[in-house]
Amino acid sequence: MTIKKAIIVCHDIVAGPPHALRDYLRGEKTEEILFIGHPNMSVAANAIKNSYARIYRQGTESRSFEASTGKLPEVLSYIKDSLLTFVWSLAKIRGKIDLFVGTGNLNAFIGLILKRIGKVDTVIYYVIDFIPKRFRNPLLNKLYHTIEKWCAQYASCTWNYAPAMIRERERMWQRSFPHQMVTPHGIFVRQENFLPRSSVHDCELVYMGFIHKFQGIMLAITAVEALRSEFKNIKLLIIGKGDADEASIREYVRLHELSAHIEFAGFIADTHAMEQIVAHAVLGMALYDPAHPFIGNTDPGKVKTYLGCGVPVIMTDCAPIAQKISAQQAGFIVPFDLDIVVKNIRTYLSQPDRIQLYRTNAFQMARSYDWNHIFTEALSVTMQQEQR
């Protein structure tokens, strides 16, 4: 099946899988793409405040528009988002839509409605995270997961970020679902992101992502604090933003006089520019707290960014990729324990030959997670299932 017209819908905050799929389809010269983004309500510091849509024709952006509805309660905001998606999908692209990709169940559900009325041929439910307790209100939570179940049941295919999502859904409903596949987080691999050894900063660690304590950022900071007397030039570069956690973390850095060793670079919107900065680091930090309920059911995106920049990874054993990284000597696994993290970083920074070996292995491993490969295979499988 040739994809001539496509719609991609997400709740937007930073560039991620739906944006990568958009860029992949643009590269494939899809005739017309409608990309819809709604504000992600889960992060108060989100720079995206309005719903927006962009139309691409033959890979080039031709039109864009947005809708401002002011601040609404979370539930009303999601209803507004769904109505906008429905209206824009009908009004902004004429004729039949070959492919509708809804990131998240609320977006995919609109795709199912559009398919029901004949506007859409193929609906992909793209699952980025699976949170059993999404809402505190049990009735809202039940409704949310009932919609999630319908999407997994009736979508042409469900793209799950990680195998744990399939297992958790089956456990919740005590049944299996058709047309499930694992479509992991990826990266567009660029050779220029693999810098020569002379351009790598020997004692620079990097943390890229949201500034939340459950992602292990405090463990990374305290490890640098413990190592600063031994490695005078050690630095942790923090790329990203956060809400309340960021303020308390910045205060910790100030009170402990760590400003010479901890740098907050903020959010970098340009993905390629951000990758070029990451590529100068000698080690990427992914020290997720394995006890946190958000950890374990997803595929950590920052890890793929590190690998794609030739940056080895130190991470907790919180996702299947951790074991692969360890086996391929593209990084190493540590428990969520300060003393062991410090010991491993110390040993690593003291072994230049190991650093270069791991850098080479990391970049080579990234090639298996190239978005071009992931999306080509996923769309091929999806279309084969749709034709059966």
Image (spheres, rainbow, N blue to C red):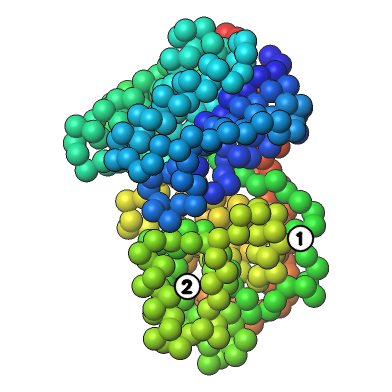
Question: In this figure, which residue is indicated by the disc labeled 1?
Answer: 194
- Toward which corner of the image does residue 6 lie, by quadrant? top right
Which quadrant does the C terminus fall into?
top right
Q: Position of residue 129 (x, y in %)?
A: 42, 41
Amino acid identity at mark 2: Ala
Q: Identify the secondary structure beneath mark 1.
A: loop
Q: Position of residue 374 (x, y in %)?
A: 65, 36
**Label 2 element class:** helix
Question: Dot 2, crowdedness within 10 Å: few (<14), some or many (≥20)?
Answer: many
> Residue 253 in the image: x percent, y percent?
44, 81
Residue annotated with mark 2: 220
Tag 1: residue type? Phe
Give the quarter of the image for residue 78.
top left
Where is 315 relative to 5, above or below? below
Q: 25 left or right of 222?
A: right
Q: Is residue 245 visible?
A: yes
Q: Residue at x 32, y 51 (%)?
A: 293
Q: Using a 10 Å C-alpha cutoff, classify the residue at mark 1 as few (fewer than 14 neighbours), some (14 to 19) or many (20 or more).
A: many
Determine which of the numbered discs, if any, sits on residue 384 in the image: none
